[in-house]
Amino acid sequence: MSDFVNSLMAEVKAKNPSEPEFHQAVQEVAESLSLVLERHPEYSSAKILERIIEPERVLMFRAPWLDDQGNVQVNRGFRIEMNSAIGPYKGGLRFHPSVNLGILKFLAFEQVFKNSLTTLPMGGGKGGSDFNPKGKSDNEVMRFCQSFMTELARHIGPNTDIPAGDIGVGGREIGFLFGQYKRLRNEFTGVLTGKGINWGGSLIRPEATGYGAVYFAAEMLGTRNETLEGKTCLVSGSGNVSQYTTEKILELGGKVVTLSDSSGYIYDEEGITKEKLNFVMELKNIRRGRIKEYAEKYKSAVYTSLMETSLDHNPIWDHPAACAFPSATENEINRDDARNLINNGVYVVSEGANMPTTAEGVKIFLDKGILYGPGKAANAGGVAVSGLEMVQNSMRLPWTREEVDNRLQHIMKSIHRTCVETAERFETPGNYVNGANIGGFLKVADAMLDLGVV
């Protein structure tokens, strides 16, 4: 590490103690940007990176609500408004017990670069709560969402901050949040994305993150004159991103053999067909069941529980394949997992989740020279279509499925091109990490120079 990165990280850790995910995200970007700051001292003298690291605003509030037994429950709500140099804050809301300030700051920081890469005018933000929707009734989820939005509504708006969904926040939650915002503000505006198709949502929005990660993998393979046709793929998670990653892989002729949830994972050597995927969608989206039921229904699958394990690696990444799509959560691929993937023949990794690979894992991928698409580039399709939803809301016009999908493909091609060209320009050809970090940074940095010290 350079002296610049060392001194910067010492300051970041002193100012932001006990936030390891945030430190990890900042360090990865800072290492890439040391290439830029040597050539462009104007960014250093204006303290551009230091300003991007510091959120413009951090909101933290309580969200009390009544459960079905009439008991008062108290959760904590957050919104990190990270950077608005190129547009209003844009980024998801996460409802999960693991949510804390450090995780949301890491996600908001990543979002700044991701949104910049999409070519759309969106700044970066992130928010959420330690509320867990799992196991709650629809009425309990509604009461929590209404309490959460009652405070959040003061701080967001279609030209200020436009939240979306993330882990634990799907169509049901967005509906309850939007209903409360509309009630409080007495206006129907595009203040949230991921809305229902009948009330301002965009076609392809639910599919966008997963589809985009597969389009990005296809673009990476294209640099070697290959396609996904006939390739075996490992996918983690079983939520929205994983489901549509699997759907698009099948469409492009690949074979998916794994899916997981927080309890364990299934390995289906025969491959997850369209019919099996429909079962997963019904299981997860409607019945809200566990992936274990897949193995009970389909005898070709083996289920492995991860609830009581002392393993230092995740066995989902220890199967023969060509491609991996980590789509569950941050840091799900560690150093040992990265080695297992490469030893099993994987040479394409396209991240559907945010920062699913640890720093040691990323180093292994880069040292081996595999096609590695980091999350801020590979999973930007979700926020890109959120941006397209905002455009449709402003125009009061819905686009067709084909039009949105074509625009999504075009944006993913553009992000891929930016990553490749930027990596080459800074003399690290094929390094998508540098390409994404530097490509995302330059647009935001130039805007910040133009806007003065604000």
Image (cartoon, grey):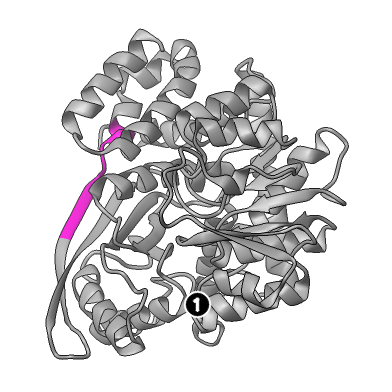
Residue range of the region highlighted in magenta in the rendering: 51-60
Q: Position of residue 368 (x, y in %)?
A: 67, 22
Instruction: Quadrant for residue 67, please give it.
Output: bottom left
Q: Is residue 52 magenta?
A: yes
- Say if residue 277 shows up in the picture: yes
Q: Which residue is mark 1?
A: 289
Instruction: Quadrant for residue 66, please give it.
Output: bottom left
SS at circle 1: loop
Task: Answer above or below: position of 30 versus 39.
Answer: below
Quarter of the picture containing the C terminus is top left
Instruction: Quadrant for residue 344, please give it.
Output: top right
Task: Answer above or below: position of 172 versus 92.
Answer: below
**Residue found 34% across the figure and 85% down from its top:** 179
Q: Position of residue 324 (x, y in %)?
A: 66, 45
**Residue found 51% across the figure and 55% down from its top:** 328
- Say if residue 203 shows up in the picture: no
Foreground of the two, 103 or 232: 232
Q: Position of residue 74 (x, y in %)?
A: 14, 71
Left or right position of 37 against 322: left
Q: Position of residue 143 (x, y in %)?
A: 25, 84
How crowded pointer 1 is (Cα within 10 Å; few <14, some 14-19, many 20+) is rated as some
